[in-house]
Image: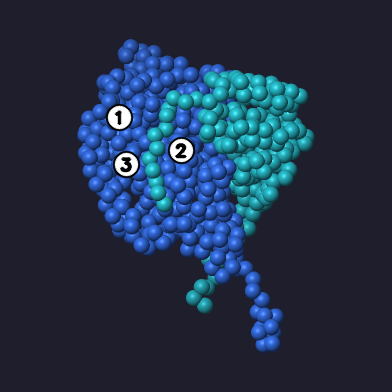
Chain colours: A blue, B cyan
Amino acid sequence: MIQKEAEKIFETRELNVNMGPQHPATHGVLRLVLDIDGETIVKVTPYVGYLHRGIEKLGESLSYFQALPLTDRMDYVSAMSNNIGYVVAVEKLFGIEAPERAKFIRTIVGEMSRISNHLLWLATHALDIGAMTVFLYCFREREWLLDLFEMICGARLTVTYPRVGGVRNDVPQEFLESLWKFTDEFPSRILEYETLIDQNRIWLQRTVGIGVISAEEAVNMGMTGPTLRGSGVPYDIRKHKPYDAYDKVDFDVPIGTTGDTYDRYRCRMLELRQSNNIIRQLIEKLPPGPVMADEPKFTLQPKDKMMPITHPTKELAYFILEKACKGCGMCLRACPAKAITGEKKSPHKINQALCVNCATCLVTCKFKSVTVVPGGKGLSDEKLAELAVAPDQLPEDIKEAQQLLVKQFEFIKKGPKVPEGELYVATEVPKGELGFYFVSDGSGKPFRMRLRAPSFIHAGCLPRLCIGHLVADVIAAIGTIDIVLGECDR
Amino acid sequence: MAVTEVRISIHTTGLDPKDIAEKIKGQFPDQVIEVAEFRDQVSVIIKRDQVVAVLKYLHDDPVLSFDHLQDLTAVDYKGKKDIRFEVVYNLYSIRYRHHIRIRAQVPENDTKINSVVPVWVGADWHERECFDMFGIEFTGHPDLRRILMPEDWEGYPLRKDYPLKGPELDKDWPSFTDVLKRSKELREFDWEG
């Protein structure tokens, strides 16, 4: 009797819990609304888009060369793989092929990026579940790889190292030596991580049988990469449609059987060993030769021919000739360093202290009033006015370099002439299948640039993985699909 | 709970995409408008009326078996083609390793097409994004809402007539002023009590 009355007063209902967008375990700005009954998940509604920057729309307004740095900002954990995906797709659209050495280098750095991504994944996944030590161990090795990236391109995360038609520059010998040493040591380091968690009872309880998904369902949901292979589907684009140098190396693809969180963890751990193996094979086989395709219509010319980077007279100073300047303000608006000052219709001036020698003013000026003074860096304005000569009286080599620079400037801005058509090219990034779909209308800018981001699809699979489990397992489920919200939201 | 390493051959390739296009033509002769080829990739342009039937055939046919929907997106051909939109399906068969692209035409005055979620569950978020960016309505979709843009956003960003830059954020998106106001209020709120 009393119980019945109590039921009337206290009705049971599901509870809504808001998780994120600022939650340390959601790996970025992912918001989940959980409907829970007791501690069991009944419904999950993911909300994404907090990091939407409109990369697809931006890509349509930029030429094929200019859009390359945007791809770093998608999956910033494995930026190198994104660059390679973009570059491979654009090369296929242009109908050009990178030289052998560039392909090998791209494969090496792509696999390095895979290792560094999986290390970050393992570190955060373990940290979410409660293993702190693994986090520190993984970051130790990741640091080494990031230092290696810095050695070849000067950046650690947003690298933009591959280029359409090859790579930016050749790798130094020290890079290869240090990387070889890394591959020597790395297998023992993997063993270290595995000793910590592989048979750990807490780890097993948190991962075995959690988020089970069958092979058929995983394929139907559009899962790719290690997330799919954990369910036992041997789909790896490196094998199905080899790009770069993947057809020249020998490697296996790990697949799971049950498709739970533990299997996906094991798959990634074995992938680390395979990637290590691939890098070793490639370093051994690395052929000599150029790193940029000889296709002047489609690729950028090497920078060392142009001012002002490695010209023999490095100490150039840019100077505006008072007589020729009409005061139109074009250079003033274009200057990225804001070094140009001046009133309308009166001669402008370059502040030498702020000038970064980018030559933008030289390219934009229509009245040929901007000139260069070889060896003029650091001199006063009066001295420069004495030394300056009109642009057409400059020495031949500087003139030639100038012309090349102007050509390059326009080439990057307008883009090459691309055949009309459309294509979809997919590459295997650490998180899954990264697809680029281009529609070209014959101009230098893509008519439509579409990015198929693996994280986006995987985030959509979250409800399927979580329902029926406990709240704590949501954390494990977010970890196991390995998403980066920058890529998900684009 | 057992993970094995398998050796996958890199030399197997599936059916020639042109043969697949012929098969679709044979099965749905009145639906196929055009077959286009570029860099070994074949696209089949179809009418939108029976898009689900065509895709279901591709998915279920034992010889074709397109089990993996790689990508679903739309393209706005404003000023280039008579029929403004095209919904693009990139299909891949993991078992047989072949690829085909299906493009369904959607006119501007009636931006509706049937949803393929019954065939591929993974199409769910793709279609929501397509609706968000192009305003194409997928009839039969279980939960068609905006996904990347805010829910009260006006306009469809990836359409060609949508500007690249807006005037100012508070004019572009009215809720932005509300958010600013609310954050200002909360800042003044005395949390200590």
Query: On the image, numbered disc 2 is attached to which residue?
Result: A234
The residue lying toward the viewer, choosing from A108 and A6, is A6
Quadrant of the snapshot with the N terminus of chain A: bottom right
Q: Which of the numbered marks, if any, corresponds to residue A322?
A: none
Disc 3 residue type (three-letter): Arg
> Which of the two marks, 1 or 2, is nearer to us in this view?
2
Q: Are marks 1 and 3 on the same chain?
A: yes
Q: Chain of mark 3?
A: A
Q: Are marks 1 and 2 on the same chain?
A: yes
Residue at 58% across, 37% down: B67
Vertical position of residue B142 compared to residue A243: above or below = below
Disc 2 residue type (three-letter): Pro
Q: Chain of mark 2?
A: A
Query: x%, y% of residue A122?
Result: 37, 51
> Which of the two marks, 3 or 2, is nearer to us in this view?
2
Question: Is the residue marked by circle 2 packed among few (<14), some (14-19), or many (20+) residues within 10 Å?
Answer: many
Q: Which of the numbered marks, if any, corresponds to residue A282?
A: 1
Query: On the image, numbered disc 3 is attached to which residue?
Result: A273
**Residue A319 in sight from this viewpoint:** no
Vertical position of residue B95 compared to residue B44: above or below = below
